[in-house]
Amino acid sequence: MDLVHALRRSRIERTDRLDDDAVRALWRFRLGHIDLRPDVSEDDDFLAFQQDLRHPDLVWTVTDRTGGLRMMMLVQRRRVALAGRSRGVLFPEYGFVDHALRGHPVVPLSLLVLLVLGLVRLRSLRACLASASYPASYISWARGLPAIASVGTRDLSVARREELHAVGRALAGSCYRAQDGTIAARTRPRPGRAPRSRSGREVLADFERMDPDWRQGRTLLWTQPLAPMLLLRFAADVVLRWARRLPSSRRPAYGTRSMRTSRS
């Protein structure tokens, strides 16, 4: 599927306006990519998923010609009290992509558009980007974000630690564990292959140092300052992925460095 066709098959919708069938379709698509913890029933998970989608957030979906889902990207928008002030937080969540769209430019494009719309709705040019990740998505984020930090990050400033705790409590409540900055998820990741590159293995080792309980369903919370320059980096990744998918005769005669942005 090229970028034009992917955009034609794309929709951006407010989550609080989705009907029950649409919510259940998103929920089933998610369960096609990740497993529930043994102590979490499908009924309980669906109720929690429904609750997450009752906020007026935005979700980008891509479908195939039969109407089947092939990608979903949801960015939640919240405000957090920090040092007596209100801070905008954008939280990419429920980002899942079928294998056929892995590496496709529509993935970082969806994230870029949803982040820009989130900033518009927050009425701010700056915010805090945050997510709670398992290893595969953390490695993707950590390779591309210049100032990603978690509670276990070495030489973490007091202000950044307070930011992480505030975001963790606001997003996860009692599921957030301040001791190590992890969040109890309803899911656990499926087995995956180890990173092939040395840098990937180093990031994985650092992740496991900070979140040794991830196999039991604890995700690692991280934050990253979100400013216009970072959005330009996301845009550059869209261009690079698009150029890579062009026939060699149509590729532009310029290059840019890659940045993986998908959580999936």
Image (cartoon, rainbow, N blue to C red):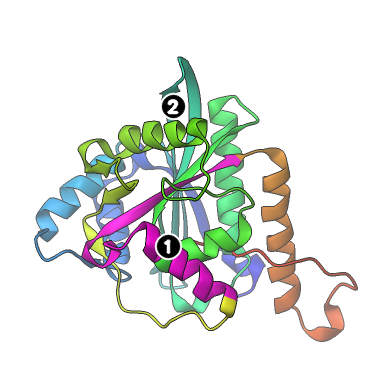
The part of the chain drawn in magenta is 199-225
Where residue 210 sits in the image (x, y, percent)? 38, 57
Is 22 situated left or right of 251 in this image? left
Q: Is residue 70 visible?
A: no
Residue corresponding to mark 2: 79
Residue corresponding to mark 1: 207
Magenta stretch holds residue 16: no
Magenta stretch holds residue 203: yes
Is 186 situated left or right of 152 in this image? left
Where residue 6 sits in the image (x, y, percent)? 58, 66
Q: For mark 2, give the secondary structure.
A: strand
Q: Residue at x 45, y 36 (%)?
A: 161
Q: Which amino acid, by three-letter code, is at mark 2?
A: Arg
Mark 1 neighbour class, 10 Å CA radius: few under 14, some 14 to 19, many 20 or more: many
Q: Which amino acid, by three-letter code, is at mark 1?
A: Phe
Where residue 180 sits in the image (x, y, percent)? 32, 48
Where residue 124 sits in the image (x, y, percent)? 61, 26
User: Does label 2 or label 1 sit earlier along the sequence?
Assistant: 2
Near-viewer residue (213 or 168)? 213
Q: For mark 1, give the secondary structure.
A: helix
| Position of 10 relative to 98 (above/below) | above
Q: Residue at x 38, y 65 (%)?
A: 208
Near-viewer residue (184 or 178)? 178
The nearer-to-camera label among 2 and 1 is 1
- Quadrant, the C terminus: bottom left
Q: Residue at x 45, y 14 (%)?
A: 84
